[in-house]
């Protein structure tokens, strides 16, 4: 845990996906689970820049949680499960638990091929900060712990010699007694260090190998209240598990396909913040669950760079610039002390037409974020699907 960070709190989240052929149906009124692929929309009602509906129906769902209205950060928003890192995620006790079958330094996660622009949240030598647990391991533990706290889903493996074998494809969760897990969940919510005790008591280990590195987002500096440096991972499950919001930080949950989330957001049913919208739009490019598994596995060791969104203020609205865009600053202010915005008397359309490389989101309304992306995605990633909500008449 980096206590020297002044401007951001370190955090981790997981884009949790699951095939929808089989799922645990929770009849809780605060849940939405799509266990059948969404039906196609008639061609005459398809009207977007590149409609995901022109592709086959999606055969997987994504988990998003609705944050409480009392939350001090992104109230009401739909987000992936995750949260801030705890000192216990970097506890050297994890070394002892992993040592018998996975030797440091990388715990058989594989060596990331990225040689430059490695996200500092993952590249920082944690031994200088008093922990033998690498960031690549600790932030996966954080994401797994927070997922358990917020949704009740426990991403662990039995403590056996085969535990550290590389996870290929979708994983099947180990089954535990739900009453026992509910008791442990309360304990972990009260004290994150109890997650270590849970693993010892249940003779299991966090399934860090099932989480594939995906992206790294920083909270924009113009959001002064709270800023997070968040490592994003992706995980593929064979089937939707028992899920239950915690009733405190999260008030409901949804298992739905990426297009269904997009439709819900655009139609005003719920709010999705820009980073989550960008990542969901990426998933809209991959309709088949098997392809998603293969893609996340193949690029798992490519790495990712740190993305700090920069606000662009135009005469008719605002946009968010991401790295690779021609207007993105060469040396962005990662401290946030300068609070620098890029301003122009031109319109958003004029500014867009004047450049060659685009990687931006134009904010037309609370529920209208239009992505314009034509850059070569770094680290063998995939660009988001560019959907224009203004033109999507079927919504």
Image (spheres, rainbow, N blue to C red):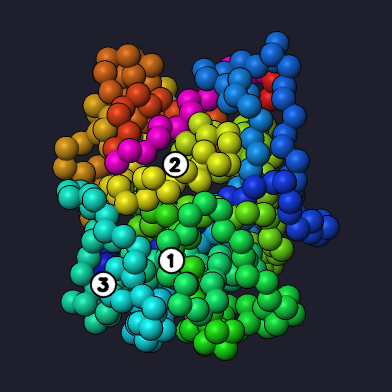
Q: Main secondary structure of the magenta part?
A: loop
The quarter of the image holding the N terminus is bottom left
Number of the label disc, if any, that sits on residue 373: none
Q: Position of residue 280 (x, y in %)?
A: 52, 40
- Placement of 387 over or under 24, stated as above or below: above
Q: Which residue is mark 1?
A: 165
Q: Position of residue 168 (x, y in %)?
A: 48, 54
- Looking at the rendered structure, the secondary structure element under dot 2 is helix
Residue 386 forms part of the magenta stretch? yes
Q: Which residue is mark 3?
A: 105
In the image: residue 32, left or right of residue 195: right
- Mark 2 crowdedness (10 Å alpha carbons): few <14, some 14-19, many ≥20: some
**Outermost residue, front direction?**
161
In the foreground, 260 or 252: 260
Dot 1 and dot 2 residues touching (CB under 8 Å): no
- Placement of 233 over or under 372, stated as above or below: below
């Amino acid at each position: 845990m980096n206590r020297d960070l002044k401007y951001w709190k370190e955090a981790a989240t997981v884009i949790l996906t699951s095939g929808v052929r089989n799922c645990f149906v929770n009849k809780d009124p605060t849940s939405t689970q799509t266990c059948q692929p969404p039906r196609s929309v008639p061609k005459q009602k398809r009207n977007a820049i590149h409609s995901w509906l022109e592709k086959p129906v999606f055969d997987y769902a994504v988990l998003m949680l609705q944050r409480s209205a009392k939350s001090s950060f992104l109230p009401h928003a739909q987000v992936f499960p995750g949260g801030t890192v705890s000192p216990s995620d970097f506890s050297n006790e994890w070394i002892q638990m992993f040592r018998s079958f996975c030797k440091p330094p990388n715990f058989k996660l594989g060596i990331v091929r990225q040689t430059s622009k490695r996200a500092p949240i993952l590249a920082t030598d944690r031994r200088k900060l008093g922990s033998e647990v690498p960031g690549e391991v600790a932030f996966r533990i954080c994401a797994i712990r927070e997922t358990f706290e917020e949704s009740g889903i426990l991403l662990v493996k039995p403590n056996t010699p085969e535990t550290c074998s590389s996870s290929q494809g979708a994983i099947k969760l180990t089954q535990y007694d739900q009453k026992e897990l509910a008791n442990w969940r309360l304990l972990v919510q009260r004290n994150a260090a109890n997650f270590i005790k849970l693993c010892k008591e249940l003779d299991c280990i966090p399934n860090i190998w099932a989480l594939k590195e995906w992206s790294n987002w920083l909270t924009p500096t113009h959001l002064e209240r709270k800023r997070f440096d968040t490592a994003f991972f992706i995980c593929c499950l064979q089937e939707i598990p028992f899920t239950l919001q915690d009733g405190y930080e999260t008030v409901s949950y949804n298992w739905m396909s990426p297009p269904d989330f997009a439709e819900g957001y655009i139609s005003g049913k719920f709010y999705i913040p820009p980073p989550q919208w960008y990542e969901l739009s990426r998933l809209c490019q991959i309709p088949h669950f098997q392809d998603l598994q293969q893609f996340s596995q193949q690029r798992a060791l490519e790495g990712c760079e740190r993305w700090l969104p920069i606000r662009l203020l135009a005469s008719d609205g605002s946009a968010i610039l991401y790295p690779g865009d021609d207007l993105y600053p060469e040396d962005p202010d990662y401290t946030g002390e300068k609070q620098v915005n890029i301003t122009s008397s031109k319109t958003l359309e004029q500014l867009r037409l004047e450049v060659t490389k685009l990687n931006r989101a134009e904010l037309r309304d609370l529920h209208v974020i239009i992505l314009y992306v034509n850059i070569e995605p770094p680290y063998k990633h995939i660009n988001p699907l560019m959907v224009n909500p203004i033109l999507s008449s079927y919504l």
